Amino acid sequence: MIARHPPTDIRDVRFVQAAPADVERGLVGFVSFTLGPLRIGGVTVRRLADSRRLALSFPCRRDAHGGRHFVVRPIGDRERRAVEFEVLRALGLTEAAAP
């Protein structure tokens, strides 16, 4: 059973499938969505290496030292799970999103 998550205002979810070679390496595709007044893009849908579960990866840039700086991301784990669940549900992939 999936735990209850805080409500989100996610809508207009769009998905572009990754190339077959990328799918073999776990990249399922790219997703964009509207969250409240913001349009969020550059988010990837990935199949985790150690399971069949799908997860979202949020866009970031790397600095000269290899450090990651997220462009946008949920503010905590609970919020990440809520956004992930709603986006994957909109794509019809909720079974794959279950922990």
Image: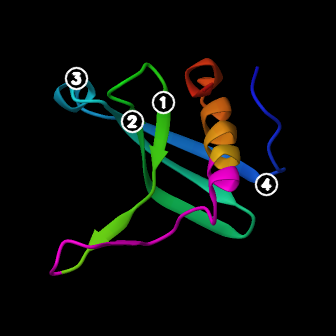
Q: Are marks 1 and 2 in contact (CB under 8 Å)?
A: yes
Q: Residue at x 38, y 31 (%)?
A: 48
Which kind of residue does numbered mark 2 sit on? Arg
Query: Is 65 within the magenta?
Result: yes
Q: Whole-Å distance between the Cαs marked 1 and 2?
A: 6 Å
Query: Is 36 within the magenta?
Result: no
Which kind of residue does numbered mark 3 sit on? Glu
Eye-nearest disc, 2 or 4: 2
Q: Residue at x 64, y 61 (%)?
A: 76
Q: Which mark is residue 54?
A: 1
Q: Residues within 10 Å of mark 1 (few under 14, many from 20)?
A: many
- Quadrant for the N terminus in the image: top right
| x and y percentages locating residue 25 in the rendered image | 22, 29
Q: Residue at x 59, y 28 (%)?
A: 97
Q: Whole-Å distance between the Cαs marked 1 and 4?
A: 21 Å
Q: Which residues are magenta?
A: 64-80
**First in sequence: mark 4 or mark 3?**
4
| x and y percentages locating residue 35 in the rendered image | 69, 60
Q: Residue at x 64, y 24 (%)?
A: 94
Residue highlighted by disc 4: 9
> Which corner quadrant of the image does residue 29 belong to?
top left
**First in sequence: mark 1 or mark 2?**
2
Q: Residues within 10 Å of mark 4 (few under 14, many from 20)?
A: few
